[in-house]
Image (tube, rainbow, N blue to C red):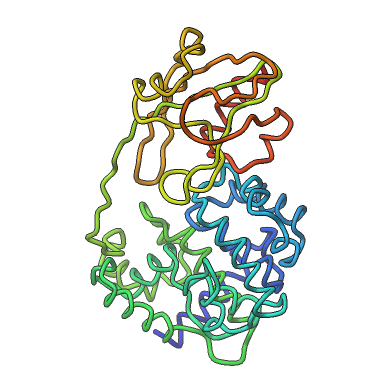
Amino acid sequence: MAAEFAPLLVAWQRSHGRSGLPWQNTRDPYRVWLSEIMLQQTQVATVLGYYARFLDRFPDVAALAAASEDEVLGLWSGLGYYSRARNLHRCAQDVVARFGGRFPARAQELVTLPGIGRSTAAAIAAFCFGERVAILDGNVKRVLSRVLAFDEDLSRSANEKALWEAAQLLLPPEGDAEAMASYTQGQMDLGATVCLPRQPQCLICPVQGLCRARLAGQPERFPVSERRLRRSALSLWLLLARRGDGAVWLHKRPARGIWAGLHSVPVFESPDALEAALRPALRPSALHRPAFLHVLTHKDLHLHPVAVAVPTGEARPPATEGEGRWVPVQEWPGLGLPAPVRRLLEEDGPG
């Protein structure tokens, strides 16, 4: 299989794979790295706009490294998984400080940078430097586990390591950088467009004749993972305090926990806690807005906005606890805000 798999996939990618995405057809590691981080657990259609805005504001790794974290989080706002943005910023600073502003060419060095895991490091090394190294993101795990009928539980690290080893054996021969790039992209494309989690399109798959799961008539049985993440739910009350001049009261969230490090309106675990913290003079004006749902990967957030009108020019905080500041209406759109808080502020209007 090893001798047949790579040539079939390379030929298919060159004729049928994706080639028009803005981070393709480049060997610039900065652009490839940026796309790889943004595409983690995020769909291509969502990433396109963010990718263009990031490149417009930060055209190279030095520009990103020199930015403030607030500016990076502000551009990232709405893309979710904000630890990616913080790691992105730290990684850019590391590339400048440790490697003189040039990404290292080997996956073994790339993986030492913040936010770059083994598969992302391999993708950068393969696309940009032609290194013969395997990737194993979610799509590729599915493709390879089906082709090989790999039925071990991938939630166990020993089994995932075995699949890594199998993936390395399927790579194109050493020394062909173009084939390595096409092969790496081909695995991603096959998992994204043909070898789907449900109802895989086996009839148009370029490796259907090699796929042991298809030959056994049960491709959807793979990959095998017995780990089941339970969903949870959390109710939060959001204090939306806005002055007559449009300024809103925001504070920076703690470094750990929900919306870590982002700017947000004050958050409370119950309506009683919000009311107790609210300045007595403002309590009569508190208006409970309709609750809304914000869905995270493994948690449902039931958010209850409470709007309070504050006189223009008021300098004091609306609540008796917690730090923060009044943020002018022209300033908060550029801050790193959780998506539901940004939505709340935008829908509420400038005052």
Left or right for 210, reference 183: left
Image coordinates for residue 35, horizontal then vertical, percent = 61, 61
Q: Give 252 or 49, whichever is nearer the viewer.
A: 252
Left or right for 149, reference 135: left
Q: Residue at x 71, y 57 (%)?
A: 67
- Which quadrant: the N terminus? bottom left
Furthest toward the bottom, the residue is: 174
Residue 83 lies, with reference to residue 331, above or below; the image says: below
Q: Give 272 or 170, whichever is nearer the viewer.
A: 272
Residue 302 lies, with reference to residue 90, above or below; the image says: above
Q: Residue at x 70, y 29 (%)?
A: 328
Q: Residue at x 39, y 46 (%)?
A: 297
Image coordinates for residue 188, horizontal then vertical, percent = 51, 65
Image coordinates for residue 50, horizontal then vertical, percent = 65, 49
Q: Quadrant of residue 203?
A: bottom left
Residue 147 lies, with reference to residue 189, above or below; the image says: below
Left or right for 115, reference 208: right
Q: How many marks?
A: 0
Residue 110 lies, with reference to residue 15, above or below; the image says: below
- Which quadrant: the C terminus? top right
